[in-house]
Image (cartoon, coloured by chain):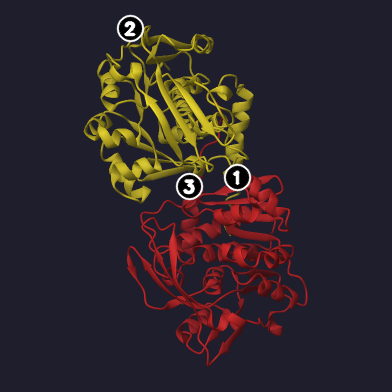
Chain colours: A red, B yellow
Amino acid sequence: MSLVVVGSMAFDALETPFGKTDKIVGGAATYISLSSSYFVKPVNVVSVVGGDFDQDHIALMHERNISTEGVQVKENEKSFFWSGRYFNDMNSRETLATELNVLGDFDPIIPDSYQGCEYLMLGNLAPQVQKTVIERLSSRPKLIVMDTMNFWMDIALDDLKETLKLVDVLSINDEEARQLSGDYSLVKAAKKIMAMGPKFLIIKKGEHGALLFHEEKVFFAPALPLEEVFDPTGAGDTFAGGFIGYLASTKDISFESMKRAVIYGSAMASFCVEKFGTERLKNLSQEEIDARVQQFVNLVAFDTVLQ
Amino acid sequence: MSLVVVGSMAFDALETPFGKTDKIVGGAATYISLSSSYFVKPVNVVSVVGGDFDQDHIALMHERNISTEGVQVKENEKSFFWSGRYFNDMNSRETLATELNVLGDFDPIIPDSYQGCEYLMLGNLAPQVQKTVIERLSSRPKLIVMDTMNFWMDIALDDLKETLKLVDVLSINDEEARQLSGDYSLVKAAKKIMAMGPKFLIIKKGEHGALLFHEEKVFFAPALPLEEVFDPTGAGDTFAGGFIGYLASTKDISFESMKRAVIYGSAMASFCVEKFGTERLKNLSQEEIDARVQQFVNLVAFDTVLQ
C-alpha cells in the first residue's frame, strides 16, 4: 500500500470574508499528504522547498508518518508562494501574487526507498514535471491519479495531453473539464477526456459535489451542505488525498471501490474548508472521519421501494 | 388522494441554443398537472385562460384525467404570455416579453367538486392569489406545497410572507432562498425560511440537484447528468408535480416519503428538459418513469461498508 505524492509545498497568504492570514503552509503535496496520512503509512512526498520553509510543519508531517526524504531543500532559495483573495460566494477567487521561486526549475528526485510504489498521486504541477516523475519510477504503479488546473491548459496543453495518456484517473473541476474538452455538457466532456487517456475521470463541482465517470457509468457524490465555508484553499487536494489514500488502504481499485473513495475524499475536503489552511487536517480522529462519512451516507440515503 | 393544482396556463415562446418555438402551451399549472397526472387521478386544476387557448391541449388534459372545471375561460381576452431566451449554459435566461392578460385580475374559483381536497399545490402566482385559494377551501388540505419566484420577493414580499405562514412545504431555487433569507449559506437560509412558516423546504439547484430540509435534517437528491438540456422551461413545475403527485399517491407525508418524492420529482423534471415545452410529458409510460427513478438510485448508490 505504498503511496507516493508529488506536488508543491508552499506558503499561501489568504483573504476570505472571515479574515486574512499571513504566510501559512500550503501547497498541493501538503494537503494531499496530510489527507492521505489518515489512510496509509508511510506517505512518501516528492517536492521542493526553500530554506524558509516551516520546520514545525516538517516535524508534523513526520509525526503523521509522512516521509520527506524526497523533499529537496534549497537552503538559499525561497519556497513557492501564492496569495489570493476569495469573494463572498467562496466559489471565485483572484490571485494576488504568485512567486514560483524553487518551483521554477523543479527537477523531481525519487529516493530509492520510494521505488516500487503501488499508488502515485500527481498533484498540480507542470505536466512535464508530472511526466518526469512517472518516467523516473522503476516500475509503473498500480494506479496513477493526476490533478491539474486550467493554468496548464492555457500554457502547456500539449504537455498536459502527453501526461494524460499515462494516467489512470484525472481529477479536475467542472470549468476545467469544459475547457479541456470544449464541451459544456459534462457528460459529453467526460467522454472526450476519457478518450485522451484516463480510464476514470473525477469532475469536482465544489459545493455541488463531484462526479466519477468510467466507461458508460457515472457516480455522483454530494458535497455536505455546510453552515460556513471558512477557507476553500486546498479542498481539491484534500479530496485527492482522501481518494487515493482510501484506495491504497483497501488495495481495491474497482469502480465500486472508487465510489467509496470519492465519498472519503469528499468527507476529508469537508473538514479542510472548516478552518484556515491545513489547520483542520492536523488532528482528526478516526471517529470524526467515520462520523463524517456517515453524514454523507445519510445525506443521499432513501428507501428505494418503488410504488 | 385528491389533488388541487393552482397556477398559470399560458403560452410561451422560447429560444434555446437548439432552436426556437412559436407560441406553445406552458404555464405552471400546465406542467404541474401533467407531471402529477402520472401519479394521481383526477388532478383538479384552478387557473384562467383566454379565448385563444389551445383546445387540443385541454383535450389532452382531459385524456390524462386532469379536470379543468376550475379553469375559467375569458373568451374575449388573451391568455398569459411569456417569451424568453436561454443562454448557452441553460442556467440563465432573459425575459423578452411578459403579457399578463387574463392573469392580471385572476380571481380563483374553486368548484364544489374540488372541495375537501387533501393535497394542494400552489404553483407560482401572486402570493395574494395563492392565499385566496387556501381561504376558499372549505377545509384545510392535509398538505399544502407552494412554489414561488424572486419576482414576488421583489414586489410583494409582505404578501409572500403572509402566505408562507399557511403552507407546509416551500419549493424555491437557490438564488431565491438566498434572496428570501439574506443568507448565502443554504443551510442558514433554510433555517430562516423554515422559521417563516413552512416545516419543509426544498431548494432546487437545477443541474446541481435539490436539497430537502426539515427540522435539523437534510436530504440531497442529485440531478441526472444529461448529455443535453434541450429546454429547461417548466422543469421546476414538473418537479413540483412529481413531488406532490407521489405524496398524494402514497398518502404518506413523512420526511422519509418526501425524500422519495424529491427523487420522483427530479426524475419527472429530467424528462421535461429533453424536449421543447410539454412535449416529453405528454406520453410517458410507467416503465420509463420507473427506469428513470432507478437511474437516480444507481447514480448515488455505493456500498457503505466502512473500513
Tag 3 secondary structure? helix
| Residue ID for mark 1 | A185
In which chain is the residue bearing label 3?
A
Residue visible at 48% across and 18% down in the picture: B40
Q: Residues within 10 Å of mark 2 (few under 14, many from 20)?
A: few
Q: Which mark is residue B112?
A: 2
Q: Residue extending furthest bottom?
A: A76
Give the spatial CA distance, label 3 vs label 1: 29 Å
Asked where in the image residue B113 lies, by quadrant, the reply is top left
Do discs 3 and 1 belong to a common subunit?
A: yes
Q: Position of residue B6 (x, y in %)?
A: 37, 20
Tag 2 secondary structure? helix
Is tag 3's residue or tag 1's residue first in the polypeptide sequence? 1
Q: Position of residue B251 (x, y in %)?
A: 43, 23
A115 w.r.t. B170: above or below: below
Relative side of A3 to B159, left or right: right
Do discs 3 and 2 belong to a common subunit?
A: no
In which chain is the residue bearing label 2?
B
Q: Name which residue type carries label 3.
A: Asn
A132 w.r.t. A73: above or below: above
Q: In the image, which is nearer the foreground, mark 3 or mark 2?
A: 2
Residue visible at 48% across and 34% down in the picture: B85
Q: Residues within 10 Å of mark 3 (few under 14, many from 20)?
A: some
| Residue ID for mark 3 | A298
Q: Residues within 10 Å of mark 1 (few under 14, many from 20)?
A: some
Give the spatial CA distance, label 1 vs label 2: 48 Å
